[in-house]
Amino acid sequence: MGKAVFISLVLVLSLFSVSAADVPVASVAAEPEWIEKDLSTEEYVYSVGYANMSRPENSKKVAEAKARSKLAMQAGVIVEEIIRSYEDENGNEYTERIRKEMASAVLEDPETVDEYTDEDGGVYVLMRIRRDNIKAAFDEILEDIG
């Protein structure tokens, strides 16, 4: 009887034993290059936002807000160039209003291109805005002022 129990025990244990090679390992996708590399081109301005909050949906919202904020700062450089040329031609009567309205317009227009969740649950969001849209928003503001 002892031998039969031992053999049964060995058989049961062998059914539940699995080698490490047999266990599938969840793989984390490789980190995309856009996290570290600026993808901005003649056509688009790109920005990356990151957040690691307690809930994934909050991480995504905060990462998007950070990406929008960075886009606004990058677009601000473009806007300042446009404003400088506008001031040269027209004086600076409306430039502060233009700056405020441009910041608002830029924050409404970004497009989410990609997102990535790292192994710690942090979310990266890649957003972009067309450079032409920045100029178009500027022109629209000038029409409203005008």
Image (spheres, grey):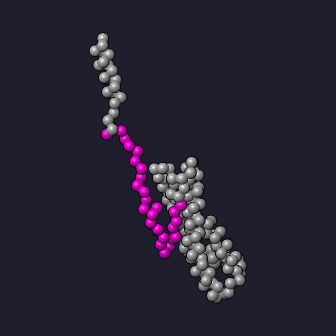
Q: Quadrant of the N terminus?
A: top left
* Res 61 → quadrant: bottom right
Q: Is residue 38 magenta?
A: yes
| Residue 95 percent location from the top left of the image | 67, 80
Q: Quadrant of the C terminus?
A: bottom right
Q: Is residue 66 above or below residue 131?
A: above
Q: Where is residue 26? Give x, y as percent.
A: 40, 45
User: Which image quadrant for residue 25?
Assistant: top left
Q: Residue furthest bottom?
A: 89
Q: Is residue 48 left or right of residue 10?
A: right
Q: Is residue 87 above or below residue 115?
A: below
Asked whether residue 89 is drawn in magenta, I would say no
The answer, for residue 138, to whether it is visible in the render is: yes
Q: Residue at x 48, y 75 (%)?
A: 42
The quadrant in which residue 74 appears is bottom right
In terms of depth relative to the viewer, which is nearer, 110 or 14?
Answer: 14
Q: Is residue 143 visible?
A: no
**Residue drawn at x 32%, y 35% as measured from the top left:** 19
Q: Residue at x 48, y 53 (%)?
A: 117
Residue at figure coordinates x 67%, y 72% from the top left = 100
Q: Position of residue 101 (x, y in %)?
A: 67, 72
Q: Is residue 96 left or right of residue 22?
A: right
**Main secondary structure type of the part rendered in magenta:** loop
**The magenta stretch spans which residues?**
21-49
Q: Is residue 25 above or below residue 140?
A: above
